[in-house]
Amino acid sequence: MAKRSDPRRSSWRRGPTTWISILGLLLLAAGQERGAFTLIGFPIEDPATRDVVERYTLARQLQTVRIIGTLKTTNWVLDRPPLAATLARHLHPPLERYHITEQGSGLFAVDDMGALRGSVRLVARGPERRIYFVEGQFRSLAHLLTLSGSMVFTLTYREHWAGNESYVEVDPQLFVRLDNVLVHGILKILAPLIHGVIDRRVEHLTAAAQVLSQRLTQDPQGLYREIRTWPDVRPAELEEYRHAFRIAADGAKGGG
């Protein structure tokens, strides 16, 4: 009587490459599944952004910020980081040292002429949401502590109406990844300092955003007349502002 062969062994002898192919497909599928990464609804392929979010040192969901205005105005300001920083410097004195300059290829340098220095770039953009990647260095006011690392912050925002007035609610979220591994070991000690720094900067940025959005919504002509006297506003920026808010060259309200 002939010995019956094991079908599994015979199939392996007949086609070992078949099993190797199947195994390869399974591994590929597993890799693709792990590679899927989304943040506030955006599929993210940027490895630096993913690294910060997945291996953050600390994360914060910040309080909702309400500003007077529309989505259109909000997006217009967010699309112009250097001009936004200039407007913030003039309208909110605590930010008078805050500068943003364009470096090309979507990269912007950030410098407050003291404690903060780094770069920021837009990772993803939608009508009501954005993701930014920041990396750089921060020094405490007494220069006793220097921290370097990266940050990812997201903005989701939506427009609401109260009677005849529109306003925008913004929900910021941030993830911070510090470079110094020693910092991670004493994070509980440093956390109050880091959170304090974040809170102070967010407070100033929020106040500046609220003042700016109010002026853009309620008095764009008056703000334009002020901007024309500022030496740190480029002629091209002034012209963009004038066209965006339909203002005549003499500062009066334009038509159309």
Image: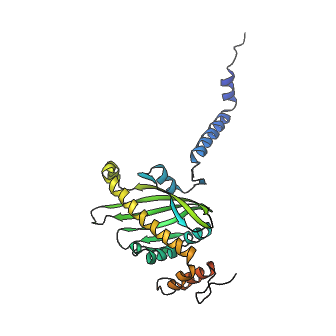
**Rendered position, 18 above or below 105:** above
In the picture shown, does residue 63 fall above or below 15?
below
Is any part of residue 105 visible from this angle?
A: no
Residue at figure coordinates x 51%, y 65% from the top left:
121
Image coordinates of residue 169 in percent, x first then y, are 55, 60
Compared to residue 64, the image places residue 238 above or below, namely: below
Q: Who is closer to the viewer here, 123 or 192? A: 192
Q: Hey, which quadrant is residue 97 in on the image?
A: bottom left
- Observer-nearest of 208 and 37: 208
Where does residue 229 sit, x and y in percent of width and height? Answer: 48, 87
Instruction: Give the total number of marks visible in the rendering.
Output: 0
The residue most toward the top is 1
Is 139 left, or right, of 7 in this rendering?
left
The answer to which quarter of the image holds residue 116 is: bottom left
> Relative to 231, is 76 on the left or the right?
right
**Coloring basis for residues:** rainbow
Which part of the image, by quadrant, shows the N terminus?
top right
* Residue reaching furthest to the right: 1
Q: Residue at x 51, y 53 (%)?
A: 50
Residue name at image x 44 percent, y 70 percent = 110
Seen as rendered, the residue at the extreme front is: 163
Q: Position of residue 247 (x, y in %)?
A: 61, 83
- Rendered location of residue 93, percent (x, y): 40, 75
Locate residue 204 relative to residue 18 in the image: left or right.
left
In the image, 101 versus 94, the foreground residue is 94
Q: Classify the position of the C terminus by image quarter.
A: bottom right
Answer yes or no: is residue 29 visible.
yes
Residue 147, by quadrant, is bottom left
What residue occupies the far bottom of the structure in this picture? 250
